[in-house]
Image (cartoon, rainbow, N blue to C red):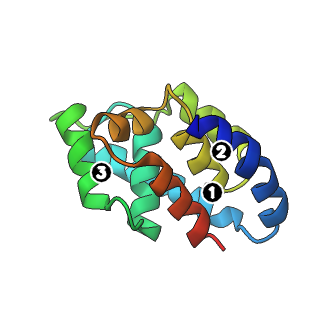
Amino acid sequence: MFKIFLKRSFYTSFFKFHEYTLIGDNMEELFKIAEQEMIELHHPYVGTEHFILAYLKKFGNDYITYDKFKEYIIKIIGCSFKESEYILYTPILRKIKNECDNYIEACVRILTDDDSIAYNVLLSNNEDIEAIYLNILNTSN
């Protein structure tokens, strides 16, 4: 029910209203931070969980901290001892990178996609995804 509400009421109207107020440079910066998170965690890919980590590192959120989300990722996904030689993106994050114009839209897509690792990490830890989502929207104004 939450996803249907988001897609109908906020998703379209929010981006039409704010399309000129969000800076694309933040999007590229967040992807660079996400790549660094992937390298630091020794993961073989850059995924939605790394992008949300990057968002939390740069902007914060009233409902989940960077450290708490990172702890969840390590607990659920783990870390490797070998550093990846390449920067590879998951198909979901690659699609988001190619289709989204700003970091808010990217976060919305991640937090409303059942296949997103970030969404599932938050869900499995009983985090209030709606509150996290709304906080992202409210802090972008």
**CA separation in Å, label 2 and label 1:** 13 Å
Query: Residue, x 35% and y 44% (percent of image)?
Result: 38
Q: Position of residue 136 (x, y in %)?
A: 54, 61
- The label number, if any, that marks residue 104 in the structure image: 1
Other residues around mark 3 within 10 Å, as few (<14) / some (14–19) / many (≥20) = many
Quadrant of the rendering where the C terminus is positioned? bottom right
In the picture shown, does residue 69 fall above or below 121? below
* Element type at mark 3: helix
**Residue tagged 2:** 6
**CA separation in Å, label 1 and label 3:** 18 Å
Q: Earlier in the sequence, mark 1 or mark 3?
A: 3
Q: Check disc 2 and give the amino acid type.
A: Leu
Q: Position of residue 58 (x, y in %)?
A: 44, 68
Q: Check disc 3 and give the amino acid type.
A: Phe
Query: Residue, x 49% and y 25% (percent of image)?
Result: 115
**CA separation in Å, label 3 and label 2:** 22 Å
Q: Check disc 1 and give the amino acid type.
A: Ile
Query: Residue, x 25% and y 31% (percent of image)?
Result: 77
Q: Position of residue 37 (x, y in %)?
A: 35, 50
> Which of the pair 81/118 is nearer the observer?
118
Quadrant of the rendering where the N terminus is positioned? top right
**Residue tagged 3:** 69
In the picture shown, does residue 24 fall above or below 73? below
